[in-house]
Image: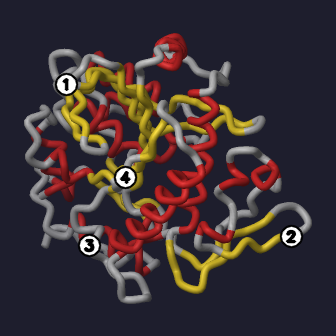
Amino acid sequence: MIFNSENIRKRKNRDIYNAMFKHSTFPSFEKVIYQSGDNAYMLKETVKNDKCETLIELFDIDNPDLFRLKYQQAVSGDGNEESRILTLVSSTLCALLFFYNITDTNPLELELNNKRVVFSKSIFEFRNVVFSNPSNIDVTLVGKDQQGNRVVLLLESKMVEYYRDVNIKSKEEISNKYLSDKIASKLYSEDLGYEIVNSNSGFRLHSNEISYIDGIKQMISHFVGVKNLVDGKYSDKNGHGNLELMKECVEDENAKFYLGVILFDKKIGELKLSTGEACLRAFMFRYRSLVKLINERFNSSKLEMLNEVMLYSLFQNNKFFVEEKIKKFYFS
């Protein structure tokens, strides 16, 4: 054992760090991390005051210039991602490291709802419109199917949240705007599988058993945002020159959009909730229920939900090039 998490205060955080890093074979692992506060471990900044260059150096990044561009996208969202990006279990970091290097010469081939697609471009933190607020998608991939038609895949990335952040009710109140919105109101119903509990300023979702409710709530918000996108409603806050590309895809009558979630499953997915059920299995059940509801309420030739949760373990033995140090950090 080269990693000791006994100083981590919260049990779930200890479970996470022990599962992932207790027997890590990453080079000099104990020398490149430090404990930050009571409940987190961070990567040390080896390049002073420069998190991006630290990551390039630490993981022997193959394409530094492209990584710098994608890093700026990844930390441009509204959640202050850069302050947490060196956290060992950062979802933003995980997505950036695995998806930054998708190019024409290093394409990623995936099967989406039984259709083979080759992706050649990645975008981070693309903004869609949800009422007056942006809905930032962690990763957007652009590619083509076997018939040469454009395909856009929008993914929410989760690393440990579906184990750590479970509850019997949603963490924050949800705006009543969702109940009057023509898209969201079709999903926030008794068929969602949660009780809707109203208050003066909004509502919360309640459940009889513990689950990652906020993850489902977030996917509903993303569906509203992506549905608005394919209907031609764009956020004017998109930078990095990607808005025009999305407009081209939306206006292409043969283009297809998919929305889904990708979870880090290696060693985390089998951690048990208080119900005794593995956290990955529990979230998959809730996700499939949401997909079923969306398919029943919406019949769109332009937009589909992924039938199943995507898993980061797909990168472990994929022919798509990922730096060996990245694989060793996450999968060893």
Real-space Cα separation, disc 1 to disc 3, in angstroms: 33 Å
For mark 3, give the secondary structure.
helix
Question: In the rendered image, which quarter contains the N terminus?
Answer: bottom left
In contact (CB < 8 Å): disc 1 and disc 2? no
Real-space Cα separation, disc 4 to disc 3, in angstroms: 31 Å
The residue positioned 73% from the left and 68% from the top of the image is: 204
Front of the two marks 2 and 4: 4
For mark 1, give the secondary structure.
loop
Q: Which numbered circle lies on residue 107?
A: 1
Residue occupied by mark 2: 199
For mark 4, give the secondary structure.
loop
Query: Is residue 113 shown above or below 192?
Result: above
Q: Amino acid at mark 3?
A: Asn
Residue occupied by mark 4: 307
Front of the two marks 2 and 3: 2
Front of the two marks 1 and 3: 1
For mark 2, give the secondary structure.
loop
Q: Amino acid at mark 4?
A: Asn
Question: In the rendered image, which quarter contains the C terminus?
Answer: bottom left
Relative to residue 255, is residue 197 drawn left or right? Answer: right
Real-space Cα separation, disc 4 to disc 1, in angstroms: 23 Å
Between disc 4 and disc 3, whose residue precedes? 3
Q: Position of residue 113 (x, y in %)?
A: 30, 45
Q: Amino acid at mark 1?
A: Pro
Between disc 2 and disc 4, whose residue precedes? 2
The residue positioned 19% from the left and 48% from the top of the image is: 314
Label 3 packing within 10 angstroms: few (<14), some (14-19), many (20+): some
